[in-house]
Image (cartoon, rainbow, N blue to C red):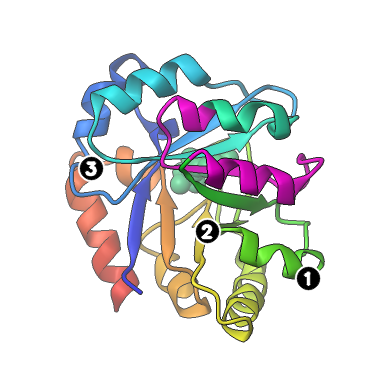
Amino acid sequence: MAVQINPSILSADFSRLAEEAKAVDGADWLHVDVMDNHFVPNLTLGVPVVESLARATDTPLDCHLMIENPDRWAPQYVEAGAGSVTFHAEAAAAPVRLAREIRAKGARASMALKPATPIEPYEDLLPELDMLLVMTVEPGFGGQAFLDIMLPKIRRTRELISKHGLKLWLQVDGGVSASTIEQCAEAGADVFVAGSAVYDTDDPAAAVSMLRRQAAE
Ligand code: DX5
Ligand code: ZN
């Protein structure tokens, strides 16, 4: 399937979010990192900001919830206008029920795995999901170094998706840049989140195009 590039607004200027969203016209999704200072040691934004962003841009929102108790909060992000909602496997009490609820409300349901969380225990859950996110850094901050020891997990996840004949997307997030995106694509990822590699440049839209070309090679 086609490669998708999702710039992460975590690396954008939070006082100019609408403009920063427009600066990446041509991106497939806008990746929105929601952090609660409990699941991760950082605090970003919540439902009201997602609601405003959804009104401010035509690019669909890919909300990555790094929060405790996603069972309670994730449906509110669908109502706020997110097109895709990712909860963490480590935080969800009832992931199947939650994925079904997200889908029933009309968004794509996605589950994320921290670097130390294996994919194998979740094999039977894959048909309930539209996307699986393999974190390639410890969640919490942008600009960290890519963990190349995650490449085998990306590969195994792709094998499981193929084995079950599923259509779900395989996303990677953390340290994705010009120097790491090809390895991720080769391992089987097809949706790429990039924060610093897009926004810490003079031309975010050009950075998106360049990453797209590199991933497709
Ligand atoms: C980190 C976030 C990422 C972050 C990635 O916890 O989930 O989405 O923005 O930033 P880079 O691409 O700079 O590693
Ligand atoms: Zn993220």
Q: Decide: marks 2, 3 in contact (CB < 8 A)? A: no
- Name the image quarter holding the N terminus: bottom left
Residue at horizontal 53 percent and vertical 58 percent from the top:
131
- Residue 208: x %, y % from top left: 25, 53
- Residue 165: x %, y % from top left: 56, 82
Mark 1, residue position: 120
Query: Could you tell which of marks 2 and 3 lies nearer the N-terminus?
Result: 2
Image height check: is 156 above or below 98?
below
Q: Nearer the viewer, mark 3 or mark 1?
A: 1
- Tell which of 46 and 81 is nearer to you: 81
- Residue 127: x %, y % from top left: 63, 66
- Residue 8: x %, y % from top left: 41, 40
Mark 2, residue position: 130
The part of the chain drawn in magenta is 77-105
Q: Is residue 97 left or right of residue 212?
A: right
Mark 3, residue position: 204
- Name the image quarter holding the C terminus: bottom left
Element type where label 1 sits in the image: helix
- Distance between the Cα atoms at labels 3 and 1? 36 Å
Q: Quadrant of residue 17?
A: top left
Dot 1 amino acid type: Glu
Residue at horizontal 19 percent and vertical 35 percent from the top:
23
- Tell which of 211 and 120 is nearer to you: 120
Decide whether residue 34 is among the magenta residues. Answer: no
- Distance between the Cα atoms at labels 2 and 1? 17 Å
Residue at horizontal 63 percent and vertical 59 percent from the top:
128
